[in-house]
């Protein structure tokens, strides 16, 4: 029988395991580099890990998103789950825990670029992104508004980690 996953805030000592997991889950190092850059640039707001049997099997990052000349927002990602425990609801646990913490912390809106079969189950939708401009706009760009109020529109400015 498989151990139950426990979600907790990531520690500095988790960084090597997070890097290894992210590279393995995505099959490349691009997302691991994004995580390092977000950390280095001070844009990270929250990182959570899922642990099973003392091993990190999942990770999610939340980071600052600027809105030109307005109050900022939050971005979600990268998120990774160890391939051997995918489809075990690890990602769902991470996203739910992170969104609860973001909402309780006063975040007005969270944006994500991701799978249209995964993120809408948490309330993410494309309509929430309509008043905003972004290079990521398209069928896989979603928003989740927690409260009415600023920012209600504007140009989204993502961390330098995501490139120009």
Image (cartoon, helix red, strand yellow):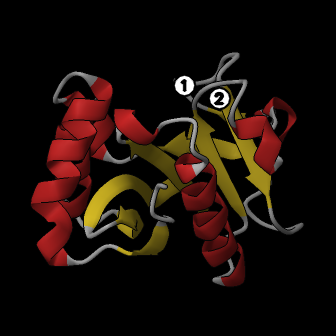
In this view of the protein, which residue sits in the foreground, 67 or 64? 64
Residue 25 rendering spot, x and y as whole percentages: 31, 32
In this view of the protein, which residue sits in the foreground, 5 or 22? 5
Q: Using the image, determine if residue 84 lies above or below residue 71.
A: above
- In this view, the residue farthest toward the bottom is 105
Residue 18 rendering spot, x and y as whole percentages: 22, 54
- The answer to whether residue 81 of the structure is visible from this angle is yes
- In this view, the residue farthest toward the top is 139
Q: Using the image, determine if residue 140 lies above or below residue 15.
A: above
Q: Which mark is residue 122?
A: none
Residue occupying image coordinates x 29% and y 59%: 56
Q: Between marks 2 and 1, how big is the CA–CA gap?
A: 6 Å
Q: Tell me which numbered mark, 2 or 1, is placed earlier along the sequence.
A: 1
Q: Which mark is residue 141?
A: 2
Residue occupying image coordinates x 49% and y 55%: 1
Residue at the disc numbered 1: 136
Residue occupying image coordinates x 45% and y 63%: 3
If the image is split into quadrants, where does the C terminus sit?
top left
Badge 1 local density, few (<14 within 10 Å), some, or many (20+)?
A: few
Pointers 2 and 1 in contact (C-beta within 8 Å): yes
Per the image, label 1 sits on a secondary structure element best described as: loop
Badge 2 local density, few (<14 within 10 Å), some, or many (20+)?
A: many
- In this view, the residue farthest toward the front is 1
Occupied quadrant, residue 38 = bottom left
Occupied quadrant, residue 115 = top right
Residue 55 rendering spot, x and y as whole percentages: 25, 62
Per the image, label 2 sits on a secondary structure element best described as: strand
How many marks on residues? 2
Residue 21 rendering spot, x and y as whole percentages: 23, 44
């Amino acid at each position: 029988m498989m151990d139950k996953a426990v979600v907790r805030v990531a520690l500095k000592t988790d960084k090597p395991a997070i890097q290894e997991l992210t590279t393995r889950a995505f099959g490349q190092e691009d997302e691991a580099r994004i995580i390092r850059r977000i950390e280095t640039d001070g844009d990270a707001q929250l990182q959570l890990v899922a642990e099973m049997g003392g091993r990190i099997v999942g990770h999610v990052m939340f980071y600052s998103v600027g809105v030109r000349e307005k109050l900022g927002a939050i971005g979600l990602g990268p998120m990774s789950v160890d391939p051997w425990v995918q489809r075990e609801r690890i990602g769902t646990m991470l996203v739910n825990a992170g969104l609860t913490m973001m909402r309780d912390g006063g975040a007005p809106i969270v944006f994500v670029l991701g799978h249209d079969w995964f993120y809408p189950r948490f309330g993410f939708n494309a309509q929430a992104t309509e008043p905003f401009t972004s290079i990521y706009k398209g069928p896989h760009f979603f928003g989740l508004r927690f409260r009415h109020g600023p920012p209600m529109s504007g140009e989204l400015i993502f961390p330098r980690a995501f490139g120009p």
